[in-house]
């Protein structure tokens, strides 16, 4: 079974940067579309970025486009989320998830396997 573990979260000041990692084990992440999601207190889980299996194309929601970058390192079986110019509104628990045989969707129910999450807090 595919297992995912996120890392790289922490406390950062507004305008700062963090790089989140999503490490996979059990199966190659290259066969999966990987999505990054976040959930702030009192809010629903929100899909923010994905990288498709196959061609590796990516998609971002408007609020993070131009600030966040998703990428893969197949040799390390890891997907990254580089987050720049962080804002207080980015504060949330961040999750990565893997979906098999899906493309271009950030609907949580379409994803099969989830990591436990990592906390990102943006505050001065």
Image (cartoon, rainbow, N blue to C red):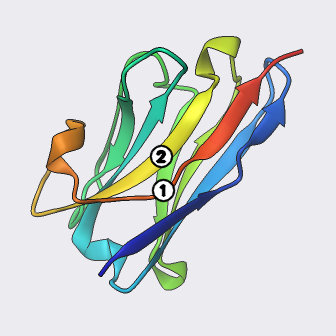
Image quadrant where residue 5 sits: bottom right
Identify whether 109 is placed above or below 4.
above
Indicate the position of residue 48 as horizontal and vertical percent values: 40, 31
Residue 61 falls left or right of residue 90: left
Using the rendered image of the protein, determine whether residue 56 is visible from the camera's viewpoint.
yes
Using the rendered image of the protein, determine whether residue 104 is visible from the camera's viewpoint.
no
- How many neighbours does mark 2 have within 10 angstroms: few (below 14), some (14-19), or many (20 or more)? many
Q: Which residue is mark 2?
A: 95
Image quadrant where residue 74 sits: bottom left
Front residue of 5 and 31: 5
Disc 1 versus disc 2: nearer the observer: 2
Furthest-right residue in view? 124
Furthest-left residue in view? 101
Q: Residue at x 25, y 66 (%)?
A: 32
Q: Classify mark 1: helix, strand or loop.
A: strand
Q: Classify mark 2: helix, strand or loop.
A: strand
Indicate the position of residue 19 as horizontal and vertical percent values: 68, 48
Number of marks in the rendered image: 2
Residue 80 falls left or right of residue 115: right
Residue 124 falls left or right of residue 91: right
Identify whether 53 is placed above or below 28.
above
Tell me the tag on residue 88: none
Q: Which residue is mark 1?
A: 71
């Amino acid at each position: 079974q595919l297992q995912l573990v996120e890392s790289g979260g922490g406390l950062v000041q507004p305008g700062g940067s963090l790089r989140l990692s999503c490490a996979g084990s059990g199966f190659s992440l290259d066969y999966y579309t990987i999505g990054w999601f976040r959930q702030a207190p009192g809010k629903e889980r929100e899909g923010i970025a994905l990288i498709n299996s196959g061609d590796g194309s990516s998609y971002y929601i408007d609020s993070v486009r131009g600030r966040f970058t998703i990428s893969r390192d197949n040799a390390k079986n890891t997907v990254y989320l580089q987050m720049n110019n962080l804002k207080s509104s980015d504060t949330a628990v961040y999750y990565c998830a893997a979906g098999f045989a899906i493309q271009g969707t950030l609907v949580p129910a379409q994803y099969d396997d989830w990591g436990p999450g990592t906390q990102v807090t943006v505050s001065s």
